[in-house]
Image: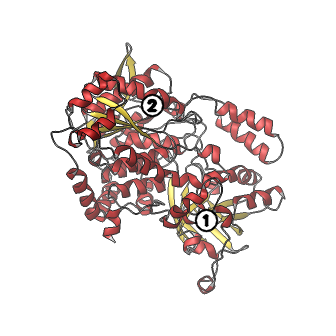
Amino acid sequence: MSLHPVLAAVTQRIIERSRATRATYLAQARAAVRQGKVERAHLSCTNQAHAFAAMPDGIKIHLKESVRPNLAIVTSYNDMLSAHQPLETFPALLKDEALKAGATAQVAGGVPAMCDGVTQGFEGMELSLFSRDVIAMSTAIALSHQMFDAALYLGVCDKIVPGLLIGALSFGHLPALFVPAGPMTTGISNDDKAKVRQLFAEGKVGRDALLESESASYHGPGTCTFYGTANSNQMLMEVMGLHLPGAAFVNPNTPLREALTRHAARVATEISAQGARFTPICDVIDEKAIVNGIVGLLATGGSTNHTLHINAIAHAAGIAVNWDDFDELSAVVPLIVRAYPNGKADVNHFHAAGGMGFVIRELLDAGLLHDDVTTVMGRGLRAHTSEAWLDDGKLAWRAAPATSGDDGVLRTAANPFSADGGLKVLTGNIGRAVIKVSAVKPEHRVVEAPAVVFHDQNELLAAFKRGELEKDFIAVIRFQGPRANGMPELHKLTPPLGVLQERGFKVALVTDGRMSGASGKVPAAIHVSPEALLGGDIGKVQNGDLVRLDADKGELSILVEAAEWAARERAAANLDAHQHGVGRDLFAGMRQQATTAEEGAMTFAHPLWTAAK
């Protein structure tokens, strides 16, 4: 199947746009490769002695020999968060299997892993986005000892995987393999959970009923089962070739998960500079892999957070991506997955229906993915059209199912849920924004209503409780961008806005903040850029202004005369309350340096791009 012309055109445009910075990145990465020697061989005896002093004697012998590759394990383990708790046992498995494969492995370092589900609606959420860049820097610190010939990255959730990947790309000469933990088993239905949340928002059930419902949903080890940012991360690593095929959605604490984890150490050994097929990450994450990631996001209705993260990941690899690339691809990429919040099923249902192998095969056969890429399995994405299974107890791969096990969850590219993808870009006199349309019913995709302006999500919640929002309106919540308060998710607003929508009111949200990957049914123009604090025109909106949000045509506008709009002054906000408490004072420098949402909301300037400017 030949490439779709739009896919080819967008990819070529990205290649041309990135030519200088990409060439510099690759030159730097390849110059760091130490041909013929393990990485630690260049260290002095004193340096090396420090690095293996605590290792068992049998491992210490191999490390002294400076012949076997040594694998770095960078882990986001903690036992407070269900998604990361299973990672506790992974280092021992990886070390054991690495030794059998002719390598050694050490835990190089840990990175923080916070959960938006815990911090949602509270002050800690204002650290969430910036934690991605802290994780990237923590990854670099872990690898800075220069003891390693390949790396295994253990991470799952929202900011953790993008942060690990950005950090890995700063060591572009090292091979990399991402090792997921998998989703928890299915609990109560997402519909039932959402209903209890709405009843609680309306005051019809108490906190005890809400907590019981939430506990029945989030009930065991593994990632939350809805298709939010965490599971979108796993999709992304698979379609970009950084996972073992079929690894994304295998439940934790199962024989298949252990087999996949162990095999990751073998593959990392194979792709090290001392292995049979040296594969540095700089050769895996190229322009075509980035485009494949965007296509996977669109085809599966993935999280809007990746309109930030993919851009930041690309940036770290010397590649320039913007929202126009997403928008043009979205027009031709079919939506072939319906998982909550875009449907009733969870990721376990999606995996059982055919999973990522089915998705990748369908998109390849439709000419909507680049096959000519390098992955951890070798050359060609076609290797990832398979699923993992245990053949008489041994790990094996077989072709993904030829037909979907449930066409209410997973469909072919020829018979999609929608002819276009799950995300769109909105433009107009307010700025540029993105909207996730895959979960928004067609009758809710165009809203024209008066603005009700807030500077804090709690102001909207209070107005809802007072009964002041029983009307058609578009909530404009500003001063929520990276520089203002760290760009928190505003998922706490989904239940009340959902209640009002179900009561028959036309409602929508416009914000320079973020929404959760679990949000969707209420139309939300998010990541408005430039943000209010950077002089964005969202700061000009006044209560009562008629706002038009048209997701079909890609419009986000205030319907006022151009002369009046140009003459308006922008509002100011007192942000003192966001400067301290829950560690926020430590992030003042990051807030001051953050780039725009479209630039990835990055808090450090990559020298490649500084030089390019």
Q: Residues within 10 Å of mark 1 (few under 14, many from 20)?
A: many
- Provide the residue designation for mark 2: 354
Q: Earlier in the sequence, mark 2 or mark 1?
A: 2
* Residue name at image x 21 percent, y 51 percent: 30
Q: Is residue 67 above or below residue 472?
A: above
Q: Residue 416: in sight, yes or no?
A: no
Q: Can residue 46 be seen here?
A: yes
Give the residue at the far front of this rendering: 46
Q: Is residue 490 above or below residue 193?
A: below
Please tell me which residue lies in front, 224 or 153: 153
Which three-letter amino acid code belongs to the residue tagged 2?
A: Gly
Quadrant in which residue 343 is drawn: top right
Secondary-structure class at tag 1: strand
| View extreme (left): residue | 36
Q: Quadrant of the N terminus?
A: top left
Q: In terms of secondary structure, where does tag 2 sit?
A: loop
Q: Quadrant of residue 143?
A: top left
Mark 2 neighbour density, 10 Å: few (under 14) some (14–19) many (20 or more): many
- Residue type at mark 1? Leu
Determine the CA span between mark 2 and mark 1. 36 Å
Q: Position of residue 46 (x, y in %)?
A: 27, 39
Return the residue nearer the eye: 407 or 305: 305
Q: What residue sits right under mark 1 in the picture?
A: 549
Q: Residue 605 location, x and y as percent?
A: 40, 63
